[in-house]
Amino acid sequence: MRTIIIDDEPLARSLLIELLEDHKDIEVIAQCNDGFEGLKAIQELQPELIFLDIQMPKITGFEMLELLDNPPKVIFTTAYDEFALKAFEVNALDYLLKPVHADRLSGALSKVRNYAQGTSQLSKDQIIPQLPEQMQRIVVKVNGEVKILPLQEVFYLEAADDYVKIHTADKYYLKHQTMSHFEQHLPEHQFVRIHRSYLVNIQHIHKVDLYEKEQYCVILRNDVRLQVSRTGYTKLKAELGF
Amino acid sequence: MPINVNKLNIKLSTLILLFTLAGGQFLWLHFTFHIEPLIAGVDSLGAYFLMYGLVLFIRYSPVFYIPKYIKYGIIEIPSFILTMLWVYFSKHALLEFFDHNQLYVDSWDKTIIGRIIIGWLLLSMAIICHLILAELKKAEEAVKLQEQAENLRKEAELFKLRQQLQPHFLFNSLNSINALINKQPKDARTMVQQLSDYLRNTLKKEDDRSVLLKEELYDLQLYLSIEKVRFGHRLKITEDMQVHNEATKVPPFLIQPLVENAIKYGLYGTTGEVAITISVKTFQGNLIFKISNPYDKDGVTVKGTGFGLESIKRRLYLLFARNDLLKIEKLTLKQDEHTAAVHLFVATLIIPIEYTKD
């Protein structure tokens, strides 16, 4: 099985390689220092399995996974991360705690092999653990480059088929994700679902206007107008307190 | 130590006492004043039923919370007022029914002093009991509060322990040792020694006891050597330590978290080489500790940003009652047109120096 190890500590990688020597079907084809190298290597080499550290320079392992359209099978490796562990309880293929035990590694690998024999492709939700913690930034990919958007720069999010358009003051970025995922994980008092298709950052609302009988719209600071649904209007009212 | 008072017992005892007194009064009226049994019975039962009402009023009326400054001697005043009310009301209510019986009407004049004395004693006792019960309740609550405080303290201690142990650092270091064991056993052994020394020294430190600066710097060296094993390919640490007085003392947990913070944000905020410079010098009775790390100008750091620095500031305030001992600067360095600008995060810590007496 073609495998890539992504970890920012060289010794952690060499330990995994040493332990993987006992598993002849695992072939380590690349090692990466961070999520950026990881993204590149995964796209070029199309591995079947990756070992992924969570805390890494600039972007976390979770964020790197979010940027992949067809993620390979993932085994997380982490030392001690309460949030990550909580996430794993909800949903994960498998995870290894550092220091990595040979037995646990074998167990994780047999899980991977079982998956490989059964369903060929895991759905995205199965692989990416649902993070219980709140998003504090959004990581997007622009022409192959990774860009980190602070939440205060995001004006609103718009549903676009399988994607979500993330609008800043004058640009937008596409991300393969659902609106409800953003609705659940963005800070609820900052981002309000005003419409089936819109999630708006209330910090950038300039005013709320009546444009037809019982039909409202919001006007953002960059003069963009967005339609507000009836339930959206109730939520907006509660959040802005008017 | 919980305090248990059986409330039902107290209520029953009160009722038995009142019935006994009612019985006594019945006999007194019947045999001494020759009142017919019906009137004597109604009189004593009615009077003590009213008394029971007054006792309940003392116990449960919020008005009856006697302020602390009223000491026990003055209890007789409210109890006397209540007694007069008791006698007044029972007399008028009973005489309403039995005003045709001259013998009974006359007996009131002869028994009124006795009735007042009995009532006064009873009500004083009731108030004293009430006060004692209230005190007991207060004591019980105090015990509960103390238990809660104790729990909180234990939790805080555990939290501190976890902070000191830094599980992330500890487990990652163990993982590195694990990686070294086979191929570089000597390095593995050195790292085990450094890690155990570092942990032992950290656990030994106490919040409020200053340590020798040279010990603090030795621990820092241990910490840095471990981090160099883990991140040697990226970490470049430049040190400039100028401390001449061996006896210099500093509070613990100030320098260490600052270094951890710099390494963490250097390593996780940027990619590529992380150059960290540390300098220690003394200036006008102060120890100046300066550390700088590169940071990503456009980067958005994940949660926990600045928390480390906030807690150091808080600690400095608790120790020295000053808010100006930790300075944070962000610098941009550009050597020439061909090299990219370097963004530096510089933290300067000023610690007023103490010296050991011996």
Image (cartoon, helix red, strand yellow):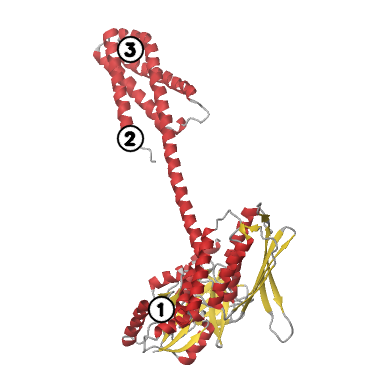
Report whether residue A5 is seen. Answer: yes
Q: What residue type is labelled 1?
A: Asp
Residue B99 is labelled as 3
Residue A218 at x, y percent in the picture: 56, 71
Left or right of A73? Residue A186 is: right
Q: Is mark 2 on a helix, strand or loop?
A: loop
Q: Is mark 3 on a helix, strand or loop?
A: loop
Question: Are labels 2 and 3 on one chain?
Answer: yes
- Residue bearing the label numbered 2: B6
Report whether residue A195 is seen. Answer: no
Count of labels shown? Answer: 3
Q: How far apart are marks 1 and 3 (CA)?
A: 92 Å
Q: Which residue lies furthest to the left in this view?
A: B37
Q: Distance between the residues labelled 2 and 1?
A: 59 Å
Chain under numbered label 3: B
| In front: label 2 or label 1 | 2
Q: How far apart are marks 2 and 3 (CA)?
A: 43 Å
Left or right of B274? Residue A178 is: left
Classed neighbour count for the residue bearing mark 2: other residues with Cα under 10 Å, few (<14), some (14–19), many (≥20)? few
Q: Which amino acid does label 2 sit on?
A: Asn
Residue A125 is labelled as 1
Earlier in the chain: of badge 2 and badge 3, it is 2
The one nearer the camera, A113 or A236, is A113
